[in-house]
Amino acid sequence: MENLKKKILQKKAIISVIGLGYVGLPLAVEFAKKGFLVIGVDTDKEKIKKINSANSYISDVPSARLKPLIKKTLKCYPDYSKLKQADVIIVAVPTPLSKTRSPDISFILKAIRKISKTIKRNQLIILESTTYPGTTRDVVLPLLEESGLKGGEDFLLAFSPERVDPGNKKYKTKNIPKVVGGINGESTQLAGFLYSQIIEKVISVSSPEIAEMTKLWENTFRAVNIGLANEMALICHKMNIDAWEVIAAARTKPFGFLPFYPGPGLGGHCLPVDPLYFSYKAGLKGIEARFIRLADEINSAMPNYVVERIKKILKRAKRALCNSKILILGITYKKNIADIRESPAIEIIKILSRRKARVSYSDPFIEKIKLGKRIFRSHPLSRRFLSQQDCVVIVTDHSLDYNFIVHNSPYILDTRNVLSNIKGVERKKIEKL
């Protein structure tokens, strides 16, 4: 594989990135910026059309950054027809949950089967899609070897988990440390060498299983601790204790404590999904992942808890939930980004709609959403509109004029503690999660 290493060093290696979403597109852009010829592949024709016209649909990749790369070092296609040209193939396709909340790796399987038809000697294949331990060695490798080539000898194979945090101003693709684990030492070494061309720090581990588990552990750690924070918030509410003040006081301890915060539920692709990939694999080994199960139950129940809190606020105002006007403020899964994947706000809107509330939303990043047959459109925040609501629910803490919102709203449920600095008579309108 020395020839491939030389091609990488000289920026002559052709790199294909399959899946041009929140992981794949930023990665493809980083390689293209460094002078590598990048072949992007995504079966969503609309995405390809946008990229090829330098119209980015991902906030972390501004359109201005795409424009100088298109048709020069970044060429994108809605099919796999150009795959045979690649020296390196990186797979960054979605790995959602099925309807039964078990891992769905069908997108990985489809991509790998396409690769196996064109795979050639001295090629490097890297899987970045989050998955359960053993996928790279036990699932991907046998499919690739159906070509007649031998993994670790004729081609190299590694797993490197994505660590994308959409909207993060400090940490981007190039300065987030990259973990790499290959099926053999040469696979690990060459994959690490490749990523070192665009990423400041690369960490090599002894196997793809270690790399796969690293990704799951990172997000399971967060999900379980958020579940604990949510449970603590529920208990504190019953005891008339401010959970947010408790956490603020606890975090003054300079050792042995990490702050995690309650909220309306988990969102994004990773946190609601990755722990269930972890528990699925544990189950195959006869182990019940009890912490994960409990955290998932608590976190999944938070949208319903938010609705129950809305009902209590309305009851004090002598209003029923049915026919009450409820404004959901923010529907993306995190602040200041246009991403609604697994957003708890969506579930809250669905529950309120089923209970016949007159629900609407306002979000500066999402113009409209379709839930079932109904289309919801974002409402501009005016004095009149806010005053007409029976309850305003802050689900996502976007950067907004909250003084204006509080002043003109009758009642507010703040699920993010964004109104902690509001004082005086206005404070009486506000309830924290």
Image (cartoon, grey):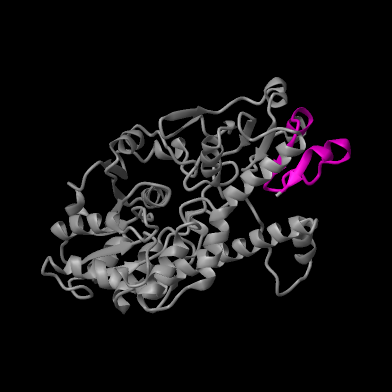
Left or right of residue 157: residue 329:
right
- Left/right of residue 58 with respect to residue 407 in the rendered view: left
Residue nearest the viewer, comparing 300 with 46: 300
Q: Is residue 251 left or right of residue 87?
A: right
Q: Decide whether residue 418 is among the magenta residues.
A: yes
Q: Residue at x 43, y 71 (%)?
A: 213
**Position of residue 337 measured from the top left corner of the image (x, y, whole percent):** 54, 42
Q: Residue at x 76, y 34 (%)?
A: 317
In x, y percent, where is residue 392? Answer: 68, 35
Residues 408 and 286: in front is 286
> Would you place residue 157 above or below residue 345 in this image?
below
Residue 243 visible from this viewpoint: no
Image height check: is 100 above or below 282? above
Q: Residue 279: horizontal and vertical position, in percent?
A: 43, 69
The residue positioned farthest toward the left in the image shown: 148
- In the image shown, does 314 or 340 lie closer to the viewer? 314
Q: Position of residue 288 (x, y in %)?
A: 45, 75
Is residue 301 magenta-colored?
no
Range of magenta residues: 405-432
Residue 91, located in which quarter of the rendered image?
bottom left
